[in-house]
Image: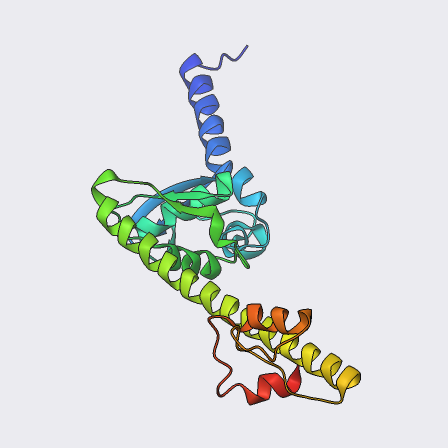
């Protein structure tokens, strides 16, 4: 009868467990920073470069023991993994990694058309002056845009009102003159009142094109 020493059995069990653990994860060396990534996470993103690097098609049936080197920034890669796990990323307020640089990194690794809204920046109270300046700048830009839209709409309303008054006046009297003076005694009818109200505070100089269009 042959006896197998217990130490050998335990050693073989440990080797099998170690082999299974290795097969369940993949080692990357990203710009000198080591990472160990589970295969299950890579399989969730099968169309990415990382998944292809770890696949049997790329590595063969016996993957190498050494970590696969990737010539990219090691710090940013950690946030790539955060995106892979959670579908969103929160960047530190004082960090060197920006939304733009992380989007480029995600694109490099094969994550296409990533919605920028999934990348946020942690709020830091020391950054309040910077945030206030940014919010004020955005407000001023939006206010300028809305003011231009309002002015264009008001001009359109004014020109349309004047054009309508001219048409009605001509059809009823054959006269194209429309009175804009509130004190004029020659003014009569409600159309002139509407015109006066429309043109108050608005100059019709240099708006021939808008008037003709109306």
Nearest the eye: 69 or 140:
140
Most extreme residue toward the front is 185
Q: How is the image coloured?
A: rainbow
Exactly how many numbered labels are in the figure? 0
Nearest the eye: 202 or 51:
202
Q: Residue sitting at 47 percent across and 43 percent down? A: 88
Image quarter in which the C terminus is found: bottom right
Q: Quadrant of residue 40?
A: top right
Q: Is residue 153 visible?
A: no
Image quarter in which the N terminus is found: top right
Nearest the eye: 136 or 109:
136
In the rendered image, residue 203, in percent from the top left (x then y), is placed at 47, 79
In the rendered image, residue 49, in percent from the top left (x then y), is placed at 51, 57
In the rendered image, residue 84, in percent from the top left (x then y), is placed at 49, 44
Most extreme residue toward the top is 1
In this rendering, the answer to whether 168 lies above or below 35 is below
Q: Is residue 54 visible?
A: yes
Q: Residue sitting at 49 percent across and 39 percent down? A: 85
Most extreme residue toward the right is 171
Q: Quadrant of residue 189?
A: bottom right
Q: Residue sitting at 76 percent across and 85 percent down? A: 173
In the rendered image, residue 16, in percent from the top left (x then y), is placed at 49, 28
In this rendering, the answer to whether 184 lies above or below 48 is below
Q: Residue sitting at 70 percent across and 77 percent down? A: 164
């Amino acid at each position: 009868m042959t006896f197998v020493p217990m130490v050998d059995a335990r050693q073989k069990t440990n080797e099998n467990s170690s082999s299974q653990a290795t097969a369940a994860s993949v080692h990357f060396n990203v710009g000198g920073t080591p990472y160990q990534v589970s295969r299950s996470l890579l399989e969730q993103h099968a169309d990415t470069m990382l998944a292809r690097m770890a696949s049997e098609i790329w590595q063969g049936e016996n993957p190498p023991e050494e970590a696969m080197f990737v010539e990219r920034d090691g710090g940013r890669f950690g946030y790539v993994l955060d995106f892979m796990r959670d579908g969103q990323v929160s960047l530190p307020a004082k960090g060197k990694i920006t939304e733009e640089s992380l989007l480029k990194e995600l694109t490099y690794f094969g994550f296409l058309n990533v919605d920028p809204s999934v990348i946020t920046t942690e709020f830091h109270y020391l950054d309040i002056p910077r945030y206030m300046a940014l919010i004020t700048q955005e407000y001023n830009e939006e206010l300028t845009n809305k003011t231009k839209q309002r002015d264009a709409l008001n001009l359109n309303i004014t020109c349309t009102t004047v054009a309508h008054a001219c048409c009605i006046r001509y059809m009823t009297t054959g006269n194209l003159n429309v009175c804009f003076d509130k004190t004029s005694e020659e003014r009569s009818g409600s159309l002139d009142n509407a015109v006066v109200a429309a043109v108050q505070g608005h100059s019709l100089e240099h708006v021939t094109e808008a008037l003709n269009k109306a």
